[in-house]
Image: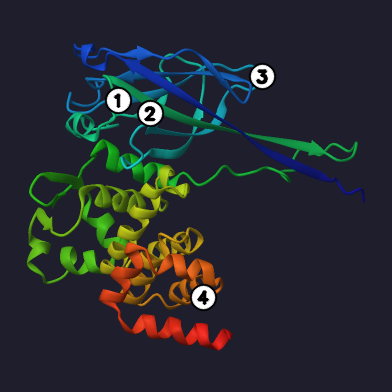
Amino acid sequence: MPVTKTSSTVAVHAGEHLLKVNGHSLLIGSNAFLTSETFRVGDHDWNIRYYPNGDRSIVDDQFTTVFLWLVNINTDEKEVTAQWCFSLKEDPTLPAKGPYTDKFVPDESSSWGVSKFVNKADLAASGCLKDDCLVIKCTVRVITSKLNNDDDDDCEDNDDGIVAPPSDLGRDLGYLLENGLKTDLTVRIGWFRSFEVHACMLAARSPVFWAQLCGAMMESRQSTIRIKDMDAKVFEVLLHYIYNDCLPEFMEETTEVAINMTQHLLVMADRYAIHRLKLICKGKLGKALDVNTVGFTLDLAEQYHCQLLKDYCLKYMVRDSERLRAIVKTSGFKQLKQNHPLIACEILHKVIDKL
């Protein structure tokens, strides 16, 4: 009996487009919008539509709105599967929206985007509007798959080689947060910021939130809770992880902003017993060690009982004597000695063991 052999190929074509909006403050009026020039990713044509005062058919005018449009398909396909993400170029601390994976068709009524992109008050305070110019970065990854027949035999009912698209659960849950659909809990950070969330999501992702919101604690009978000692931007990234099960795009890079945010997230992951997030943070900090960061990272590792991260920091410090001399002069090492004076003795013993 002949055996039909097939194989499949999946390819990803990535591209970025920057939309620069000059004279941003001059864009007034409900449903005013701008459309970018057409750009190409994966042999298809795209553009961006930006609503500086929000798309009034979806949200109020407290938020900006941004959409990605497929202008033209340059193949025989009827639809295009793409992963997309929007962020602000000048302030990576404002979490990116995405990445999400969706199917696009070149239709005026078909687009994907973020109805609540950035709160206008946050935008004004962020410093992104340099010289009244806003820069929006759009990242697009076009995903294509092809089924290859490896022999000449036809088999009409053969499903071998069909590739399932990436899971869209994170995208769907992320939409719930962005669009504020049926939220039932207000989380106040400090005295000035508040977030509308779903209590069941927080409870499902954190046993600490579960105890607060579903147990016998007073918070379980309230529709508003207040969290102290947390920066609003850190909580926004924490929410991104809770709903999307991944970190924002800006944290994929080893920038000073990303490392600083990772340090804060490790603390919050420990506080709310989100163990996978804590492991992710430890891994990122371990890969980003340098002379200036290792002292702060070791301080965190000791304080929050991250033994593997602590061992990695110690090995990094004592591996090179010149490097160690530079490290002990940094503010991070001075903080480490102040908070954990016995660490200095441990480092000394490791240096002696190497002699």
Q: Is residue 53 above or below residue 158?
A: above
Q: Is 307 positioned to the left or the right of 265 in the image?
A: right
Which residue is label 2 attached to? 113
Q: Amino acid at mark 1?
A: Thr
Badge 4 marks a residue whose secondary structure is: helix
Quadrant of image for the C terminus: bottom right
> For residue 266, which quarter of the picture?
bottom left
Mark 2 to mark 4 CA distance (whole Å): 49 Å
Estimate the x, y position of residue 115 in percent, counting from the top left.
29, 29
Mark 4 residue crowding within 10 angstroms, few (<14) / some (14–19) / many (20+): some
Which residue is label 4 attached to? 318
Q: Earlier in the sequence, mark 2 or mark 1?
A: 1
Estimate the x, y position of residue 343 in percent, counting from the top left.
37, 81
State which mark lies toward you, 1 or 4. Answer: 4
Mark 3 to mark 2 CA distance (whole Å): 23 Å
Estimate the x, y position of residue 276 in percent, counting from the top left.
41, 65
Q: Amino acid at mark 2?
A: Gly
Mark 3 to mark 1 CA distance (whole Å): 30 Å
